[in-house]
Image: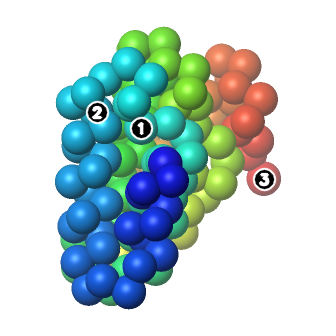
Amino acid sequence: NILLNAILKSKSEQKLEEAEKLMAQMQEIGGDARPDSASFNMIISALSRSNAPDAAEKAVDYLRSMLRLYKNDGYEKAKPDSFIFNCVINMLSRCKQEWADEVIQRTLSAMEAQERHGNASVLLD
C-alpha cells in the first residue's frame, strides 16, 4: 500500500495505469499481498478525481473485485465501507453512460446487502 500511495501521489501522467498494474500484481501474488480496503479506497479515490472516460467503469470493476474478495473468498481485509460505495455512486451520478443509472441501483442494493449481513462499516445515509 505504501508503493500504491506513492504512485498515486506522483506527478506521473501514467500514475493510474501504474497503480492498476500494481493492483493486478498484488492480486496475482495473493495471500496478504492481495489488495485490501485501503488499496481499493486509494485506487477508486484516484479514479474519482480522474478525467479518464472509463474511470467510472473501472471504479465499478474494482468495487466488484473488492466484494468478491470479501464475500466469496472471505478476505476480511477487503471489507467494503460506506466511503467506497459512496465514492462509486458519486462517480456514476456524474457519468454520461447509459448504463450508469442501472449500476447505481445495483450498487445501492449491494450496499444494503452488506448492511443487512452485518457489515458495520456500511451505513446507509
Q: Are marks 1 and 2 in contact (CB under 8 Å)?
A: yes
Residue sitting at x 47%, y 75%:
9
- How many angstroms separate mark 1 from mark 2 (CA)? 6 Å
Left or right for 78, reference 11: right
Q: Earlier in the sequence, mark 1 or mark 2?
A: 2
Task: Identify the element where label 2 is drawn.
Answer: helix
Q: Nearer the viewer, residue 41 or 32?
A: 32
Residue 100 at x, y percent in the picture = 34, 64
Q: Earlier in the sequence, mark 2 or mark 3?
A: 2
Q: Are marks 3 and 1 in contact (CB under 8 Å)?
A: no
- Residue indicated by mark 1: 35
> Which amino acid is tagged 3?
Asp
Residue sitting at x 28%, y 51%:
22
> Which amino acid is tagged 1?
Pro
Task: Identify the element where label 3 is drawn.
Answer: loop
- Residue indicated by mark 2: 27
Residue sitting at x 31%, y 37%:
26
